[in-house]
Image: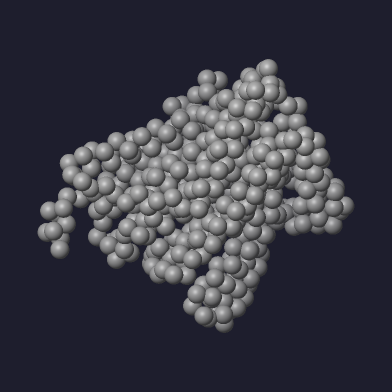
Amino acid sequence: MVLTLSFILPYLLLLYFLIRSVNKQIYLFGVAFLIYFHFSIFFENVKIFAVPGRFDTNILFAAWLIILWMIFKIINYYQLRNRKGFTPEKGGRSSIDYLIIGLMIITILDLFIVYVEHLRIENVFTEFITIFSLFLGFFIIKEVFRYYSPGIIAEFLFSIVIVNSLASVLYIVHQGLHLGLYLNEEYLSEVFRGEVITRTFWFMPPLWFLSICYLLVIKKGKSILYFILLIINLIALFISYTRSFLIITFIILILYYLLNAYKNKNFYAAAKNILLTIIAGLVLLVVISKIFPTSTNYFLNRFVELKQGLHDVESNSLLYRFSRTGAILNKIEPDKLIIGYGPVTEVQSSLVGSMRVVTWDLVWTGVVFRWGIIGLVLFILLYIISIVKAFNLFIKKDGISSQLALMLLLVIVSQLIESFVSATFMSSDRYAMGLWYLGILSAVIIADKNFSDSTDKDQNDVRNAILEPEDKKANNK
């Protein structure tokens, strides 16, 4: 049964996105998100997207992202070649783009330095492609999504929320009910109050915060369905036993109410909603404790661990993570602190192995190691400017553009907070789409200029609304 599910499910999801892409080409990019989900939906079983032993997974991911981008370029070419003198608006470069370009320049410069300084350069170019794909993926995502209206982008993202919710159901069954669906090795297994508790991160649904933010912000008369999906994602997040995820979720909820209150000048409603959310959360906690009593006690006990020494490995507190990061930074050579070591591997620097381990718990360790202080400043500015742009779009606009901006703002905040407890955009096997949310934000800003919310309901394929013949436009008038 498990083997059948693990074989059929990824192909069914792939088939769904391919069928939807016939009429709305944006769904073809769902393939990239399926690769991003990877183990959580058994997508490693789709061999064309995962060739064991032949290509590095990150390289394969980047290659497929480029292939998908080329397909979109070909589609655009055939749509436009009969249109004399017509070119869709490029949208120009933004400050976000220039910061990304700055990081790309540092990465290329580091590559040349590594080739000059080291006699042995095994795997350096592979590491360079992996790191560079982080920024290349941003521009590919922006280039693809900018052709579609905010309404179509929101519709597409809902399909990704559905996939994450499905992965959450599998995660609940596997980790919550202990009905083993994933056959790979668990991250942690221990006995707690006579029951075996397992923890796994390889199979964890990767887009919980997107799902939660989307289901909070974007509602289109599907409140019951959205509520069910939200509960599924919240239960799965709880079953992960990840303290920081629970805290981030609470921050997202509070921030959502406060931002809406600020825009609508109604802070009474925000206070009421926050109170109701706290009550609903306590009720949900009671329900979960009845369904998963041992799991609930185990999770609550993890908060008790924080009372241990601040540098105790069992508490794994933020100060403990900072102490490990400090140990790595102290070993970095002074001349490498400016622009980092770049794409070096264990062959060129013995510090790489330790850096990767610590980066799993705090991504800024890897940022300083790879791109130095300049890179750290550029990444900080990248997040600050993205938050400001999303906030401005949310405040100044109404309708789906405003909702998408708020959703992406909450996602960016969640990723910024999570960056202090995980590898986020430097997660293994996912570099090529590590900054997907920033790419979509840049695309939404451009799309908002090209489309009005009122046209969404009339568009079968919004990109064709950009590219439709002039005589058809005249007739529509």
Left or right: 467, with 209 as reference point: left
Q: How is the image coloured?
A: one colour
Name which residue lies at 66% across and 64% down. Answer: 286
| Vertical side of 130 occupied by 285: above or below | below
Quarter of the image holding residue 20?
top left
| Vertical side of 279 occupied by 168: above or below | above
How far across and down, in percent of the image, does residue 305 sit? 81, 53
Left or right: 402, with 417 as reference point: left
How far across and down, in percent of the image, does residue 162 sit? 45, 51
How far across and down, in percent of the image, does residue 330 sit? 81, 40
Left or right: 373, with 312 as reference point: left
Q: How many marks?
A: 0
Give the quadrant of the C terminus: bottom left
Residue 119 in view, yes or no: yes
Name which residue lies at 52% across and 36% down. Answer: 133
Quarter of the image holding residue 351?
top right
How far across and down, in percent of the image, does residue 315 sit? 81, 50
Residue 36 in view, yes or no: no
Left or right: 336, with 66 as reference point: right
Name which residue lies at 61% across and 45% down. Answer: 424
| Vertical side of 207 occupied by 66: above or below | above
Residue nearest the observer in this picture, 367 or 227: 367
Residue nearest the observer in this picture, 256 or 183: 256
Residue that extends furthest to the right in the rendered view of this protein: 309
Name which residue lies at 77% across and 43% down. Answer: 325
